[in-house]
Amino acid sequence: MDHEELLSTVTALGASLLENGAEIYRVEESMNLLYAAYGEKGEVFVIPSCIFSSISAGEGRTFTKTKRVSPRGANFDRIAALNDLCRRVCSTTPPLSQVRRELDEINHRAFFPFLWQVFGSALVAFAFTLLFNGSLADAICSIPAAVLVKLLTRGMEKAHTNSFFTYIAGSALGAFIALAAVALGLGQHHDRIIIGVFMNLVPGMAMTNAIRDIIAGDLLSGIFKIVEALMVGLAIAIGAGLAISFSRVFWGVG
Amino acid sequence: MDWLFEGVFPCIYSFATCIGYCVVCNSPRRTILPASFCGGAGWGVYLAFAFTGNDLYQYFAAAVAITMLSEILARVQKCPVTLYLIPALLPLVPGGGIYYTMEHCLNGDNDLFLQTGLHTLAIAGCLALGVLLVTSLVRLWKSVKPALFHPRRPEP
């Protein structure tokens, strides 16, 4: 058994799980199970931005790998595929080169095309505005707002802007469009349009993962994600607040 | 017709919201409809608990129902639970609370600002409590089940 190869393959799998939005305990458990499947005892410690993993190779030698991970946002398709891969590897223990190949395949799996994602966020805003008792006109106004917000936030993510500023800008843009739509008489309730657009930005995933991490006993990561959720909530409130107070001062609407 | 507009349509809107979010999160195609069903059913439970007269109970009940459904679906489809839980909880996340808190803050209405802000945090807490309750019970069941069905015989 090549310890270094095992270490780097398992760590790569864990890193892929982590950066696509899996919970901490899922990453730790998967890695531990993989080590056990190949007959090694691994020690794994994971926080949302880093993986520390080591196995002992006997004769007092230990191999350790530290892997810095930057989260890329939710990609459930990859989490499901990695989960399947992990189950399969644990039951059949194929050669590591094959695991590595399948892992590369999963890491290059196609997203939904970007157009579909824009469509998805438009659908979120449209349906949620209706759910929040908005009129049909409000819901239709929320579609262009959500599309433009999605384009803006994606562009800023590509340019590696920090996420706090991205959320402020996205929510400000959404609020401006909603206020403009109401001022032009296209929609009736600016608050409901803005809330519909908010739903694309709210920290639903950070919140759910925070709860699940805390339940699993990973308090450090739980706190990390609760703070993230609070920061994102604060950022979208600041963004919309800026937009509304500006338009009150300069246009007298809102 | 009231029941249609107040009972059925909101669940359909919630379902549609979840479909949109699943696409944004790039869910595998086979989990999109089950996860969205979870979201629609969760909103149905939220509406069904309107008789309690306190929306915190409604959020709690909906979170419990969604988590239970997600745990079941995850076992049926052999997928991680979060693939169902995250989209299904999205319509319940208090985006409206965040907005109105901010608006009261802008208006300089400190009483309403504090009240709405605390209410928003309370909603988030209720959702967390609902998820925590069900997930912890499932974990407890997982660790107790082997002991119940395959009791370890004492070594002779």
Image (cartoon, rainbow, N blue to C red):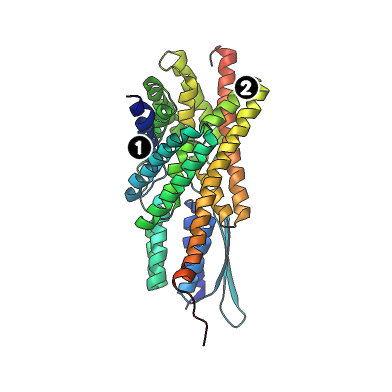
What's the residue at 59%, 28% (across, down)?
B101
Residue farthest toward the top in the current orientation of the protein: A252
Chain containing mark 2? B
Quadrant assignment for the N terminus of chain B:
top left
Q: Residues within 10 Å of mark 1 (few under 14, many from 20)?
A: few
Q: Quadrant of residue A245?
A: top right
Left/right placement of residue A17 relative to residue B1 reads right
Note whether A171 is above or below A82 in the view shown: above
User: Which amino acid, by three-letter code, is at mark 1?
Assistant: Leu
Q: How many marks?
A: 2
| Residue that carries the numbered disc 2 in the rendered image | B106
Note whether B108 is above or below A81 in the view shown: above
Element under label 1? helix
Left/right placement of residue B20 relative to residue A3 reads left
Task: Please report contact status of discs 1 and 2: CB closer than 8 Å, yes or no.
Answer: no
**As rendered, which of A62 and B14 lies closer to the eye?**
B14
User: Which amino acid, by three-letter code, is at mark 2?
Assistant: Leu
The x, y position of residue A159, in whole percent, is 51, 39
Identify the disc placed on residue A126: none
